[in-house]
Image: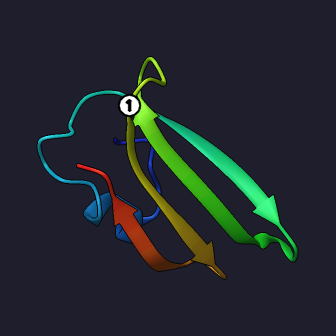
Amino acid sequence: MDDIKNEQVKASIPNENNQELKCWIFFYDGGASNVVYLLQDKEGLENKGIGLLKDGELVKPISFV
């Protein structure tokens, strides 16, 4: 989790998920200012959370844990 730079995203991850995570980044209309991320376990088998970063601000994160 130390590799996650956005403090709002870090705060949205429950403490029990201190394991290594895989993060998928999807850019959509607007380029780097609009990013959807998907957090999964290391193997990519279990989804941990998803959210939208709009201009660096976290919008409506969803935790699956």
**Residue 34, located in which quarter of the rendered image?**
bottom right
**Residue 62, located in which quarter of the rendered image?**
bottom left
Give amino acid for label 1.
Answer: Glu
Q: Nearer the viewer, residue 2 or 35?
A: 35
Residue sitting at 27 percent across and 55 percent down?
13
Quarter of the image for the N terminus: give it: top left
Furthest-left residue in this view: 16
Scheme of image coloration:
rainbow
The percent coordinates of residue 33 (x first, y second) are 75, 75
Name the residue carrying label 1.
Answer: 46
**Residue 21, located in which quarter of the rendered image?**
top left
Residue sitting at 87 percent across and 77 percent down?
30
Disc 1 element = loop
17 with respect to 23 (left or right): left
The percent coordinates of residue 42 (x first, y second) are 41, 22
50 with respect to 14 (left or right): right
Residue sitting at 20 percent across and 36 percent down?
18
Instruction: In the rendered view, tell whether residue 30 sits above or below residue 16.
Output: below
Q: Nearer the viewer, residue 50 or 31?
A: 50
Furthest-top residue in this view: 43
The percent coordinates of residue 27 (x first, y second) are 78, 60
